[in-house]
Amino acid sequence: MKRALYTLLWSLGMPLVLVRLAWRARRQPEYLHHLRERFARLPTPSAPCIWLHAVSVGETRGAQPLLKALLDAYPRHHILLTHMTPTGRATGHELFGEEPRVQQAWLPYDVPWLMRRFLKTVQPVCGIVMETEVWPNLMHAAHSMGIPMMLVNARLSARSAAGYARLGGLARRAFAGFNVIAAQSEDDATRLRALAGEAGARTVCVTGNIKYDVGVSAALHERGMTFKSLTENRLVVLAASTREGEEALLLDAFRAQAPSNVLLVLVPRHPQRFDAVAELIQRAGLPLQRRSDQASVDAATRVWLGDSMGEMGAYYAMADVSLIGGSWLPFGSQNLIESCAAGVPVMIGPHSFNFADAAEKAIEAGAASRCADVETGMQAALALLKDTQRRNAMSHAGLAFYKLHGGATARLMKLIREVLDH
């Protein structure tokens, strides 16, 4: 009954969904590209297909080691990689665009007839969903068609668990429909077991976070060294993957506290905001250059705007300390593991519920510091620039922390083989 009501709401709301899609396309025209795929009109794969869903950028980057392992383990299969956002799809193209066995598409809207058409067209031998993207009608359709489903690298904050719990049996049946739920941490697993109920709890296990297995690209590291040379080796504070509302706070704190020889490299999370952030920097009265200018950074420049896609590894490689975006306002934080993997000390704000386990472990390891607000975070970052010994210690701690927690991909592949080779 609840799923019927959920479906009715989706059906009645579809015109509004399309209006919202068109509205978002004003800033990102890519939302309207390949529009047929959103209604499950896509080519039938030419080989047996493993379907992997990664909603946006973070999930797509996190899926990189798993997708490579799947390609190696199943050479006769193709991978269908689906997304919900243009930035996720662009990231997938950047990472796998030259791999002929990887096809990309949008995941259709969660109404029964679209999900059935999608699954009948794709005919996946298995569906693998990254992190928290759970759709009731999709799960119902997969179950009715006998398609095994896995939720991997699964995370569930207390806030999200409470939200799903309000849906009652609708959410419980959706989570219980997974053949396997591979959680990032014990806390995630506990909340997922409670949500899945008695029938689904036995499917939940802990495999760790595969983002520890992403690795550091040699090409991006070299590019970061090139970036560093463009600054004439100035000390760099990196504000990484910032969200709307955070940039103004960071710019105020930097302008008030930072000496003129320190460069702020500011990289917004969403590319459609690059121009808006550039305007913020100019209004703050801070001399600005942009990565897209492809020019050496003038000594008078205070802020270098990272207005590019797919170069976060390079920005980390040039940084001396990082402030992690999404953690200064209640967005839940972006991925601090990337900073640790590059040996860059981390300053993280009070809001890290999306990376709660990684944040606490990084702090315990001495790789990261928790700061109450942006002003405190900037003060701590600038103090660290003056303390070479402590900065080096945090750098080494970050690298050790990153290496210690790897291996989730291998554990996931063991579970996937048990499902696919059954």
Image (cartoon, grey):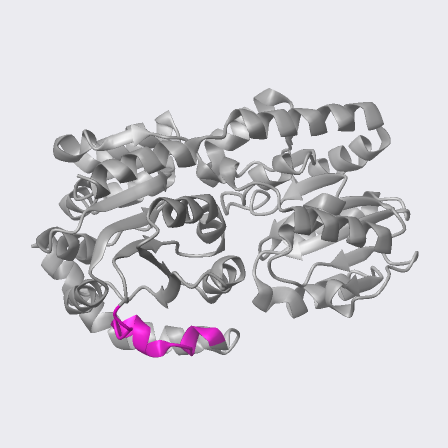
39 up-or-down from 196: above or below: below
**Of all residues shown, which one is farthest toward the right?**
299
| Residue name at image x 27 percent, y 62 percent | 47
**Can residue 348 be seen at all in this image of the molecule?**
no
The magenta segment: 30-44
Farthest residue, direction front? 76
Whether 158 is drawn above or below 132: the answer is: above
Left or right relative to 292: residue 16 = left
- Quadrant of the image containing the C terminus: top left
- The image shows residue 43 at horizontal and vertical percentages of 28, 73
Quadrant position of residue 345: top right
In the depicted structure, whether residue 16 falls above or below residue 67: below
The residue at the point 49 percent across, 77 percent down is 29
User: Can you say which quadrant of the picture contains the N terminus?
Assistant: bottom left
Residue 11: in sight, yes or no?
Answer: yes
Q: Going 86% across and 61% down the picture, which residue do you hit?
A: 296
Q: Position of residue 13 (x, y in %)?
A: 24, 71
- State the image coordinates of residue 311 (x, y, percent, origin top left): 64, 55
Q: Quadrant of residue 208?
A: top left
| Camera-side residue of 221 and 252 | 221
Asked if residue 39 is among those painted magenta in the image, a careful observer would answer yes
Q: Is residue 42 magenta?
A: yes
Q: Relative to 2, is 45 on the left or the right?
A: right
